Amino acid sequence: MDLTKYSDFVFAYLSEYGLKIIAAVVILFIGKSAVKKLTALIKTVMIKAKIDLTLVEFLENVIYFALLIVVVLASLNALGINTTSFLAVFGAASLAIGLALKDSLSNIGAAVLIIIFRPFKVGDFIDAAGASGIVEDINLFSTVIATGDNKVTIVPNSSIISGNVTNYSNKTTRRVSHVFGIGYNDDLKLAKETLLQIMHDDERVLKEPAPFVAVGELGSSSVNLVFRAWVKTEDYWNVHFDMLERVKLTFDEKGISIPYPQMDVHVNKES
């Protein structure tokens, strides 16, 4: 090959594609740097806005990769590559991946809803999706719950969002409720005064709302008294169990009976 023609070919090739390659590389490196800085800025703004850290990290990754894809497409476009077909392939691949991972994606969507609407947070005692316990962690796919006997239950976020959630830690106070039965021959007024006195003597029982005792039902074998006391949420279980013991011991001291089901058996003797 003639060297003159070869050099002319190389020069023409570099003239046509050299600048495009340089422009593509510049766009890629500058764009990547800009994406990092912009993502860091958005993360700082979200943290200052006191958005949950789990959601911040999730959105940070989504924004970073979305902007990075835009930069890559701009770089390819600078090379003269038609990105329309690439977008079509990318869209089809995204659809296929989305269908394959729809359960995982639904858990991620549920995690975002949990973080935004905050039905509960780490440290709360909840009842959700058949699990009860203290929330130890909320991640993008599941919520980790430690049960009362220290077992760990991992519940998919989508299961939590699709059902009822009871948060026992959301309020600062809770009501201890019991029903105590006394015999029909027992002193009703004494029993009511005794129950009220037990609540008044316990410093953990709040004065407002005031302790409450009333006849709730005239049962088949007992007069059932409704017993209600308001306490701080952190005192709930201690007061719940203490009251059962104190009522039993005090009723025994004052001669107030607590009836239990009995069956009378009559035997007829034939001569």
Image (cartoon, helix red, strand yellow):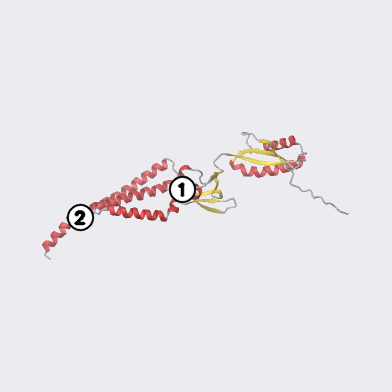
Residue nearest the observer in this picture, 18 or 192: 192
The extreme right residue here reads 271
Q: Quadrant of residue 197?
A: top right
Residue nearest the observer in this picture, 130 or 126: 130
Give the percent coordinates (x, y) of residue 140: 45, 50
Q: Which mark is residue 18?
A: 2
| Quadrant position of the N terminus in the picture | bottom left
| Label 2, label 1: how far apart the Cα atoms are | 49 Å
Q: Which mark is residue 110?
A: 1
| Amino acid at circle 1 | Ala
The residue at the point 20 percent across, 55 percent down is: 18
Secondary structure under the numbered disc 1 in the rendered image: helix
Question: Above or below — where is 200 with respect to 139?
Answer: above
Q: Are marks 2 and 1 in contact (CB under 8 Å)?
A: no
| Quadrant position of the C terminus in the picture | bottom right
Secondary structure under the numbered disc 2 in the rendered image: helix
Q: Which mark is residue 61?
A: none
Q: Quadrant of residue 237?
A: top right
Q: Nearer the viewer, mark 2 or mark 1?
A: 1
Report the side of 1 relative to 193 (left or right). left
